[in-house]
Amino acid sequence: MAFKVIIVGGGPIGLYMAHAFERANIDYVILEQQDTVLNISGQLLFTWPQTVRLFDQIGLLDDLEKVSLGIHHKKRLFGDNGRVTTTSNFWDAMQDNHGYPFLPLLRSELVKILYIHLKGRESNIRVNSRVTDIKPHATGVHVHLADGTLIQGSIVVGADGVHSRTRKIMDSLAAQHALNPARLANKPMVSTFYGIFGRASNVNLGIEPEVFFESRGGGPNDGGAVVQCLATKDIVQFVTLKPLPGGPTSDRSPRYSDQEMEEYATSLADVAVCPGVKFSDVWANVERKSTRMLNQEEGFLNNWFFDRIVLVGDAVHKSTSVNGLGMTCGLHSGAVLANELHSLISQLVGKEEEKREPTTEELESAFKRYQEDRKSEVKPVWNGGHAMIREVVKKGWVSWFWDRFVLPWCDMETFARGWLVSWLLIRQGQILRFVPFEGRKGRVPWARKVGVVVV
């Protein structure tokens, strides 16, 4: 059997990896448990310049730019009185630095574009495919589905999100092999915050378009919260976060009722989302069908693979949405994993005397390199997001003093036109090493280019 990757999960990470495998001439199948990979999710995903570059490499940039929301300025403000504390043109500065813009994208639009440009969208995606078991063997894997179907392949890539079924099965297999029996009882993802993703009409609100507002600390009558929003002249996309009232939990996010969502919105009614507009005003204009309330998990796993199973994205490193880097971290992990697999398979195919499939040991070595590479890059970002959400929801004089007097003078996003962020984070973005690509350039050179790594 030719080498074949079984991707569990048809979200942005799984679809991106399918694009990468098509360009690497690696066979794949996507298993999606829903009846379609397309959805109407109103979640807004911040696509950073290094990730826009990845999409450009696979030919999606023009379509993504057409559906993205405009963004030019960022304003932070106090949630209790609407006073703006900082204003920056961080987004435009990053485009000057790197040649690529920030693209705020609706998840539904991103998934649709990834899907329609995938050559194997009709033949290589199986919907209504819920994984119940994975059985690795010496030369491949057997994946069992709830409907009784058996899918055979060489490896499994778990891109099935924070509640990854692939991760649970992998941990069970690791426990059976006595590598870490405690992993069966371990619940690596913990929710400390919860909130609402939504969309509202901006026709009557008049929120300034193309400005990202971040309301910090909450209003006068709540226990601390953050509200982020971005508007066009017609709509406003928003997300709220505040601490769970019962404290951290490792239980899966419940399906919140309409009444619970109303009560949550009422608790934030007096929070200023921008000067002159309170959350109650936004909620009065909300589009209910595209609005969801859920817990936001956090977690960072130590072990990302076992045997012929490897995890990617939120299945191994999950942050809240507050820093907008979750998808970016996941996609770049996907690129590194695709590079490792392409390199391994190319080496074997190139040996005329062998021309064989990679062994489990060779695959685990590739998975280990992928894990070590990405851990060193993702963990600092994860740590930053973990600290950031706890800072922005705080109430009290220390947080007030920081936002009012310190942050305007030591903000990494505005210091030297964002060069610290450019050099320490954005320029380090990954690239598919096996796909010819030049791409755009800015004032800050990319550390990784096709065939070149700058240190």
Image: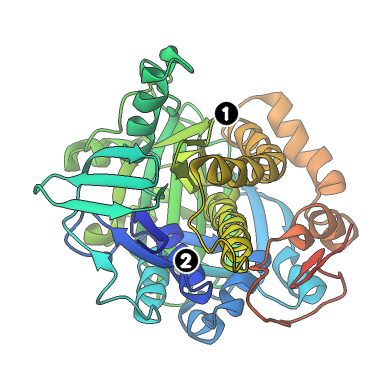
Secondary element under disc 1, as helix, strand or loop, is: loop
The CA distance from mark 1 to mark 2 is: 24 Å
Residue under label 1, please give it. 302
Q: Quadrant of the N terminus?
A: bottom left
287 to the left or right of 388 = left
Measured as percent of width and height from the top left, residue 51 is found at 61, 65
Residue 319 in sight from this viewpoint: no
Residue at figure coordinates x 86%, y 60% from the top left: 419
Q: Is residue 440 shown above or below 311?
A: below
31 to the left or right of 309 = left
Residue 116 in sight from this viewpoint: yes
Kind of residue at badge 2: Tyr
Residue at figure coordinates x 56%, y 33% from the top left: 393
Measured as percent of width and height from the top left, residue 46 is found at 55, 61
Kind of residue at badge 1: Asn
Q: Residues within 10 Å of mark 1 (few under 14, many from 20)?
A: few
Residue under label 2, please give it. 16
